[in-house]
Image (cartoon, rainbow, N blue to C red):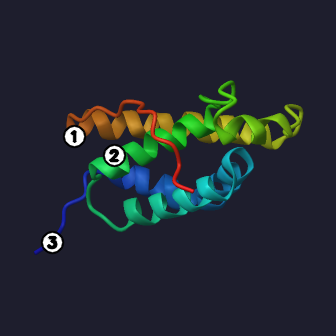
């Protein structure tokens, strides 16, 4: 009858909701419209469910990889082109780093609370 949401999942949902705009802006800046769409969908999915699905887990890993510039040195991926036009001295770079760290903390908490592993998988954004 009632869905019980564990506290780490609720904390993740609150973080995603409170940082919705910043995560969208970072996704657009670092990965373009496909990354923006993926981030919007991911946040909506996670915030509407009492637990993470495997798809949500993969989406969180992808988002974290985007925020941490995991693939910017791979010239076959669009992230490298988006990164090339960014000025590292801009103040929003620090905000993106903080978002990445805070997301990682919440992902770790959810993984520990549920016994799941969130591993990086190379799955490109759908265009």
Q: Which residue is drawn at 30% across and 64% down?
A: 49
Distance between the Cα atoms at labels 1 and 2?
9 Å
Circle nearer the N terminus (2, 3): 3
Q: Is residue 124 above or below residue 16?
A: above
Q: Mark 1, mark 2: which one is toward the viewer? A: 1
Circle nearer the N terminus (1, 2): 2
Q: Mark 3 points at which residue?
A: 2
Q: Locate residue 54, reporting x and y percent.
A: 28, 47
Secondary structure beneath label 2: helix
Secondary structure beneath label 1: helix
Residue situated in front as seen by the camera: 4 or 117: 117
Q: Residue at x 45, y 66 (%)?
A: 44
Q: Locate residue 121, reporting x and y percent.
A: 41, 33
Q: Is residue 33 above or below residue 110?
A: below
Which residue appears farthest toward the front when viewing the image? 76
Secondary structure beneath label 3: loop
State if disc 2 and disc 1 touch (CB < 8 Å): yes
Q: Give the left or right position of residue 122, taking residue 109 as reference.
A: right
Circle nearer the N terminus (3, 1): 3
Q: Give the left or right position of residue 119, taking residue 14 as reference.
A: left
* Residue 48 in which image quadrant: bottom left
Q: Name the residue under label 2.
A: 8
Q: Which residue is drawn at 67% across and 54% down?
A: 22
Q: Locate residue 100, reporting x and y percent.
A: 59, 37
Q: Mark 1 points at which residue?
A: 114
Q: Which residue is drawn at 35% across and 45% down?
A: 57
């Amino acid at each position: 009858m009632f869905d019980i949401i564990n506290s780490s999942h609720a904390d993740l949902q609150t973080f995603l909701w409170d940082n919705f705009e910043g995560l969208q802006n970072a996704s657009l800046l670092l990965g373009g419209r496909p990354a923006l769409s993926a981030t919007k969908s991911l946040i909506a999915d996670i915030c509407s469910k009492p637990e993470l699905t495997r798809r949500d887990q993969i989406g969180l890993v992808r988002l974290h990889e985007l925020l941490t510039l995991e693939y910017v040195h791979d010239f076959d991926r669009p992230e490298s082109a988006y990164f090339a036009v960014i000025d590292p001295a801009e103040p929003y770079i620090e905000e993106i780093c903080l978002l990445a760290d805070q997301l990682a903390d919440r992902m770790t908490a959810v993984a520990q609370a549920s016994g799941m592993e969130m591993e990086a998988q190379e799955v490109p954004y759908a265009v």
